[in-house]
Image (tube, rainbow, N blue to C red):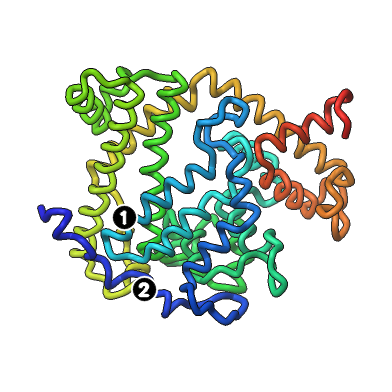
């Protein structure tokens, strides 16, 4: 196998060129000092939705501690991995970074527990999907600029945001696509039946790498499982064992950090080698050639995909289904459900700016407005809002 040094820059010919961007839905004169993709990244960082990620948790509720991952720290970690991969492969770092920073904008408070409840509540009203919610945020819900709603991101950024996990339609145009994406796509075609850019694929696999490492870290520090528990895992176990042998007298907290660094490196190196292999087989000429392929060009090898699956199964059993986490998420689910039902039945309780345009109780329009409001809440704000509305001792 070629060394990683030999593979450096191998995908440069298929990188998204900002000078050839398909542009923005609302025309703007581009900046002289920043590329279109750099401008996308900057708009995402300065958005209200991005700032709120600092108080939206991944697994633990915010009150459980200050050092567990939040959506913000996770997004920053994904961006770091994505930039590193793109730099080595010769892809556009700025586009991958923008997508990494934006990919979780549509997530609700309380992690997956909050999203699951909102999906259940919105089932009679065309559903809820966090990727579709991310699109709503960057195209509609952010109100910062005088000339348009949303952030007016480039076509490439919107495409990657919607399709980073792969095509949403097959070649016959069939597929279950969230309504928000269907509605937007009708006026601005994101080519839902194709793969996204290589940069979007890098952002997606970087999400997996970051998730695996930081959930292991958080779970170990929270005492949900032990150092010894992970030793039987493929990939992870041998790395943890090797670190323990190399540093026999080092504190376990340092051993964990050292081992997780090794896990990230092993997964990233695998992505580089596998992506180079797929490129050599498919030989796409440019970014559109990547979109036209039958499968993703960036991803794990078959063996690493199995390791990734085993690790996710371990985390599901030992972390996400741990009694401590279940008790927290049960409380979170009740908070989201009760807030939704109350606002749906009594929309006059919504803040004044959320009542604009008139809302009728239990109507589809009201349901979507309530979902937008709740999805934007941080963990702490949701708990406080619930107290204000349900606890007679708390001032409204």
Q: Which residue is drawn at 64% across and 57% down?
A: 137
**Against 138, is 23 above or below?**
below
Q: Residue at x 40, y 19 (%)?
A: 225
Relative image position of residue 30 (x, y in whole percent): 54, 79
Relative image position of residue 156 (x, y in whole percent): 47, 69
- Asked if the residue at tag 1 contacts the one at tag 2, i.e. Cβ–Cβ closer than 8 Å, the answer is no
Q: Residues within 10 Å of mark 1 (few under 14, many from 20)?
A: many
The answer to whether residue 179 is seen in the rendering is no
Mark drawn on residue 288: 2
**Against 37, is 377 above or below?**
above
**Could you tell me which secondary element the residue under label 2 belongs to?**
helix
- Closest to the observer: 365 or 87? 87
**Against 233, is 199 above or below?**
below
Q: How crowded is mark 2: few (under 14 residues within 10 Å), some or many (20 or more)?
A: some
**Could you tell me which secondary element the residue under label 1 belongs to?**
helix
Q: Residue at x 36, y 50 (%)?
A: 81
The residue under label 1 is: 85
- Closest to the observer: 172 or 8? 8
**Does label 2 or label 1 sit earlier along the sequence?**
1
Q: How far apart are marks 2 and 1 (CA)?
A: 20 Å
Relative image position of residue 229 (x, y in whole percent): 32, 19
The answer to whether residue 309 is seen in the rendering is yes
Quarter of the view holding residue 185: bottom right
**Against 29, is 388 above or below?**
above
Relative image position of residue 44 (x, y in whole percent): 56, 59
Mark drawn on residue 305: none
């Amino acid at each position: 196998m070629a060394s990683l040094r030999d593979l450096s820059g191998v995908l440069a010919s298929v990188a998204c060129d900002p000078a050839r961007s398909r542009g923005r839905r609302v025309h703007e004169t581009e900046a002289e000092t920043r590329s279109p993709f750099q401008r996308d990244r900057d708009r995402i960082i300065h958005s209200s939705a991005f700032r709120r990620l600092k108080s939206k948790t991944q697994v633990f509720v915010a009150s459980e501690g200050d050092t567990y991952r939040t959506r913000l720290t996770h997004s920053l970690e994904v961006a770091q991995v994505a930039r590193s991969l793109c730099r080595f492969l010769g892809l556009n770092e700025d586009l991958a970074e923008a997508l990494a920073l934006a990919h979780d904008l549509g997530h609700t408070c309380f992690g997956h527990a909050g999203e699951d409840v909102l999906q259940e509540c919105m089932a009679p009203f065309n559903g809820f999907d966090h990727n579709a919610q991310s699109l709503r945020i960057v195209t509609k819900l952010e109100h910062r600029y005088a000339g348009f709603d949303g952030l007016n991101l480039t076509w490439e950024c919107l495409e990657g945001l919607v399709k980073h996990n792969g095509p949403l339609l097959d070649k016959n145009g069939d597929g279950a696509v969230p309504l928000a994406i269907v509605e937007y796509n009708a006026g601005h075609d994101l080519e839902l039946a194709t793969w996204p850019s290589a940069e979007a694929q890098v952002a997606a696999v970087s999400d997996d790498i970051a998730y695996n490492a930081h959930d292991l870290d958080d779970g170990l520090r929270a005492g949900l499982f032990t150092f010894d528990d992970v030793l039987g895992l493929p990939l992870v176990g041998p790395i943890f064992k090797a670190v323990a042998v190399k540093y026999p007298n080092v504190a376990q907290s340092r051993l964990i950090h050292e081992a997780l660094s090794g896990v990230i490196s092993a997964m990233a190196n695998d992505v580089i080698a596998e992506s180079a292999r797929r490129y050599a087989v498919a030989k796409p000429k440019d970014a559109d050639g990547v979109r036209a392929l039958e499968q993703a060009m960036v991803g794990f090898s078959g063996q690493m995909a199995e390791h990734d699956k085993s690790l996710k199964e371990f985390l599901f059993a030992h972390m996400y289904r741990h009694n401590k986490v279940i008790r927290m998420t049960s409380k979170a689910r009740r908070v989201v459900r009760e807030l939704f039902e109350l606002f749906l039945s009594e929309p006059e309780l919504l803040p004044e700016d959320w009542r604009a345009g008139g809302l009728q109780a239990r109507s589809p329009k009201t349901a979507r407005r309530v979902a937008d409001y709740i999805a934007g809440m941080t963990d702490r704000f949701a708990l406080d809002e619930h107290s204000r509305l349900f606890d007679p001792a708390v001032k409204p």
